Structure formats: structure tokens, C-alpha cells
Amino acid sequence: MSVSDTSAKAQGHVRRIVTGHDAQGQSIVTEDRAAARRFTVEVDAAVVMVNASTRFTDGGEFGFGAEIGISTQKLHARGPMALPELTTTKWVVEGDGQIRV
């Protein structure tokens, strides 16, 4: 966790602490909509939260049922592939300060 006075500093913090396969979920807490938009576009993570806890990064919370694993790869298909297997998903979640206990 880090407190930053600019979006660029927040993104720099994420780049310093997150490397490649660790980029599962990141969050920004801000009232600045432009900063939130920049963060969601520029941060390389599977899930980017705005004003919500990263504890919501869970298969059950996304409606996928019981979670049996988390892929931290950008492309994880094997064998014959078509367009769906060559596509990645980035989830953007916007909240109003929700937490998960």
C-alpha cells in the first residue's frame, strides 16, 4: 500500500512492487475521475479497482462460482487456438469505498 499525491506516482509504485505474473489486482482510491481513468488504462493487471478493495478479486465475486485457481499468465491457452484463446480480459471495477470482510 502506498499513498501518492499523483496518479503517475501511484502507477510508479505499482510498477516497482508488481512484476509480470504478480499483476492480479490493483486498486486506486481517489475522487479524481481523470486519475482513476488513467490508472485503469495504464496499470497492467487482470483486475483494476477504483475506490474498492482488491479483496473483491475473486471468482465467486465475479459470479464464476467456486474458484479453483487463478491464472496469472496473460495468455494461458494450450493446444489448438482461435480468436477467443488469443484474447485477454482486463476487469475494471468501480466502487464507492466498499471493503470485503
Image (tube, rainbow, N blue to C red):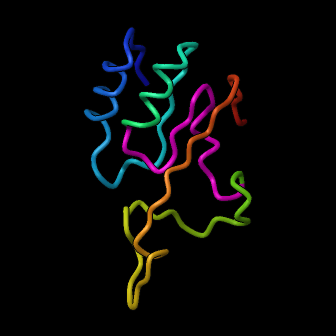
Name the residue furthest bottom: 80
Question: Is residue 62 shown left or right of residue 36?
Answer: right
Percent position of residue 68, x then y: 60, 70
**Closest to the observer, 3 or 5:** 5
Residue depicted at 38% across the width and 84% down the height: 78
Question: Is residue 67 shown left or right of residue 19?
Answer: right
Name the residue furthest top: 5
Name the residue furthest front: 83
Percent position of residue 99, x then y: 69, 30
Percent position of residue 56, x then y: 64, 43
Residue 58 inside the magenta-drawn segment: yes
Residue depicted at 49% across the width and 51% down the height: 90
Q: Is residue 96 above or below residue 57?
A: above
**Closest to the observer, 88 or 68:** 88
Residue 52 inside the magenta-drawn segment: yes
Percent position of residue 30, x then y: 54, 16
Question: Is residue 30 shown left or right of residue 61?
Answer: left
Q: Is residue 50 above or below residue 79?
A: above
Residue depicted at 34% across the width and 27% down the height: 11
Report which quarter residue 18 is drawn in.
top left
Q: Which residues are magenta?
A: 43-60
Quarter occupied by the C terminus: top right
Residue depicted at 50% across the width and 57% down the height: 89
Quarter occupied by the N terminus: top left
Q: How many numbered discs, if any?
A: 0
Q: Is residue 69 above or below residue 48?
A: below
